[in-house]
Amino acid sequence: MKLLIKNIKKLINVRDESPCRPLSGGELGVLPTIDNCYLLIEEGLISDYGTMGECDLQSLENMADKVIDAEGKMVFPSYCDSHTHLVYAGSREIEFMDKIRGLSYQEIARRGGGILNSVELLHNTSEDALYAQAKGRAEEIIAFGTGAVEIKSGYGLTLEDEIKMLRVAKRVDEQTPLTVKTTFLGAHAVPARYAGRKDEYVDEIVREMIPAVAAEGLADYVDIFCEEGFFSVEDSEKIFEAGIKYGMRPKVHANQMSFSGGVQVGVKYGARSVDHLEFTGEAEFEALKGSDTIPTLLPGATFFLEMDFAPARRMIECGLPVAIASNYNPGSCPCGDMKFMMALGCLKMKMFPEEVINAATINGAFAMDVNSSLGSITRGKVANVFVTKEVPSYEFLPYSFSTPLVDTVILNGEIVG
Ligand code: NIG
């Protein structure tokens, strides 16, 4: 299949060479583009691009099986959403009411709500029903322009239910056009059956769950909610050591509600990313400098929980890379719209449009290890792109934060929406 997109007003994030490291500091503010151009897709891959003025349009059109005229429209690489909990059962709008009445996330969790509420809902949902719900969310984010997504477990908290979640995440990979990376998050909360005996639960994760998840090849990463009231730095060390032994690189829910030490322990164990980071300062920046760990910001959760936003500008000034992800989940961010996350990045974290676009595409790709095939318009990369509706500029996307602006979605070189 050969697909030609012609008359593109602006092709976004065009990189002849894919970067070999995540974009850091000032690099984040540089967004390479080409005006008035074409994009050629062959056998699922980006095969060529160039300006309309310099191409032989007739021969391009003759060779193409399909031609899209993108007059007035832009073409972006699909978003790479490197932190989600897309597989979950039901919803938690009842807690939304508690939240409106003034209860905090931790207070709701202490009353048996929060993550444990989703755990019970998931336990009572069959694998097929769970897949049907996840597929609906997958279709929703595809329509928003996402092409690759990381999906965590963590609403099972028993071996059986954690495996059920991860199998569903694998099905999303196999049966939808999304590229999926999976993360084992058994240490998301202490389940009711271990109330007051957290260490014994950590022991079960290390001795039973991690080996069983690895035996089925269900997870690329191992994650933990390193936070007061959830899991500690010491728990993180035990779980990371076990995960690494079984080939799972760490990720961390770090510094979301406090200076938890999550960033430092993540860096110490070579985490692929440390995510959330609302509570970060000089000690965390120092730990991250020179490391291979990507600070990943989840502004949708910060917005929904009405907290202070992560200090993105300071991170960029420190020369750090920054990725942005949606954190789509039923408790702290029931939203998987990466354009809205970019808008929050601009409005609430004072990032510039070039920075949020890079953070949501190429840096998101690094944060889930798909950067060699996704995240930019580069010859030879997988053709995951979206064509916008007619827009005046790329800044219009984060500016016009709720208007649907995706016109056509192309994943793996096929038009899927
Ligand atoms: O990333 N912080 C922990 N986990 C999720 C929220 C999960 C939930 O409340 O269901 C997050 O924000």
Image (cartoon, rainbow, N blue to C red):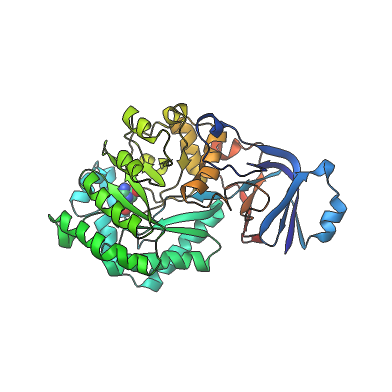
Q: Position of residue 279 (x, y in %)?
A: 31, 34
Q: Measured from the top left, where is residue 78 in percent x and y?
A: 58, 50
Residue 238 % position (x, y): 25, 52
For this view, does 53 lie left or right of residue 30?
A: right
Q: Residue at x 49, y 43 (%)?
A: 340
Q: As rendered, which of 283 and 275 lies closer to the eye?
A: 283
113 lies left or right of 196:
right
Q: Quadrant of residue 129?
A: bottom left
Quadrant of the image containing the N terminus: bottom right
Residue at the spot 39% in from the left edge and 35% down from the top edge: 288
Can residue 149 be seen here? The reply is yes
Residue 299 placement: quadrant = top left
Quarter of the image for residue 411 reads bottom right
Query: Where 151 falls versus 278 (above or below)?
Result: below
On screen, residue 379 above or below 278: below
For the residue pair 31 and 15, the one nearer the viewer reads as 15
Q: Could you say which is closer to the camera, residue 48 or residue 2?
A: 48
Count the numbered circles shown. 0
Residue farthest to the left, as pictured: 196
Left or right: 131 with respect to 208?
right
Q: Judge left or right: residue 254 versus residue 55.
A: left
Q: What residue appears at the point 54 percent right and 29 percent down from the top-left corner?
A: 26
- Regarding residue 191, the answer to whether it shows in the image is no
Which x, y percent locates residue 130?
Answer: 39, 68
> Is the C terminus in the top left, top right, bottom left or bottom right quadrant?
bottom right
Residue closest to the eye, 134 or 92: 134
